Amino acid sequence: MRVLVLVLAFLFAPFLHGQAMVSVNPAKPKIGELTTLTLSQVVPFSVTWTFGDDTPAVVGGAITTHTFTRPGSFLVRAAYSLSAVSGVTATVQRAVFVGTTGPSAPFSISYLALRWEDGTVRRTVNQGDRNLVAFADLKYEGTGQFQAQWLVDGVAFRSFSRQLTFANRVTLNSGPQLSLPTNIPGEHLVTLQVFQPGLTFEVPVIRYFVSLGPDPEGPVLKSVMPKRVRAGEEVELQFVGPRLTQDMELHLGRDMAAVGPIRLIGPEQAVVKVFVAPTARPGTRILRSSREKGSPAGTARLEVLPVFKKH
């Protein structure tokens, strides 16, 4: 009996599949708009939908919904079978044109900040360091091609171009596989020269100092109390370690900053009040210290807890 069903399904498949088609509602969807796709003129047992926009395929029935997240032309395919046992399938496809939502806004940059990985604007590295990467945080409106180049001491280091779509925020970097130059000791300036779009403000400058090696006379953070802090709170930290000074630089990581002066309270002991931003990422971080032009040193471990949520 199963063999007979398979034979009949094979013989009549062209007639059963004859005028199958895919309809789209709305006919010209916009970005972010829920779009209904319908396979008509057949009664399928199952349908595998692919949308042409690199999103995963969906297995379902004759009707499905999808939301396109970028503009363009996408080839939607419906691969369907008419029986659970026939194994005979057919495919219908249709191009769907997705447009932008409403009038396009001019492409512009409203905010641009440069930083190092830990959120600071100045850092010290050893000569020959191969992991020095700068970051640029952007806020933009509209859609367009962002074209810029990184400058080190006024000299072009790396040019790049990136398509930015929709009003949003994005973080770009100077290249995780291409370290900024650290062969020449001393202080160096890093900035971003933007070619497109035009800016109405001056791009900031961040600095790094190339040291000849670890500073044997610099301060070292060995431990810290309390061991845990919570994002969004202000707390006083007590450090223990050799050669601590009131003018030492603290390297606390991104989203954490000293909001008061450093005070020495005893041999190898210092306290400082810090604020942990609500955006601080939970987890354990290593705190370090240095002199103005020395290498950061320390092994003080501090755990950042998530923001406390009131129920």
Image (spheres, grey):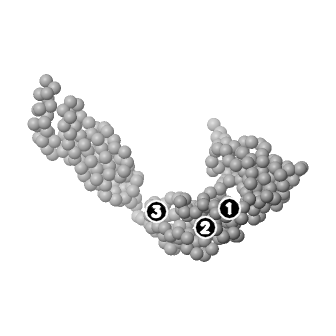
Is residue 239 found left or right of 205 in the rendered image? right
* Label 1: few (<14), some (14–19) or many (≥20) C-alpha neighbours in 10 Å: many
* Label 3: few (<14), some (14–19) or many (≥20) C-alpha neighbours in 10 Å: some
Q: Position of residue 152 (x, y in %)?
A: 60, 71
Question: In the picture shown, does residue 90 fall above or below 186?
Answer: above
Res 81 label: none
- According to the picture, the residue beneath numbered tag 3 turns out to be 164
Image quadrant holding the N terminus, namely top left
Marks 2/1: CA–CA distance: 11 Å
Q: Please tell me which residue lies in front, 290 or 228.
A: 290
Identify the residue at image location x=14%, y=44%. 18
Question: In the picture shown, does residue 302 fall above or below 181?
Answer: above
Res 125 label: 1
Is residue 16 found left or right of 260 in the rendered image? left
Identify the residue at image location x=49%, y=60%. 167
Image quadrant holding the C terminus, namely top right
Q: Position of residue 187 (x, y in %)?
A: 69, 70
Marks 3/2: CA–CA distance: 28 Å
Three-letter amino acid code of the residue under disc 2: Pro
Does the rendering let one see residue 284? yes
Q: Nearer the viewer, mark 3 or mark 2?
A: 2
Q: Residue furthest top?
A: 1
First in sequence: mark 3 or mark 2?
Answer: 3
Identify the residue at image location x=53%, y=60%. 177
Marks 3/1: CA–CA distance: 32 Å
Q: Please tell me which residue lies in front, 109 or 123.
A: 123
Is residue 8 found left or right of 59 in the rendered image? left
Does the rendering let one see residue 27? no
* SS under mark 1: strand
Three-letter amino acid code of the residue under disc 1: Val
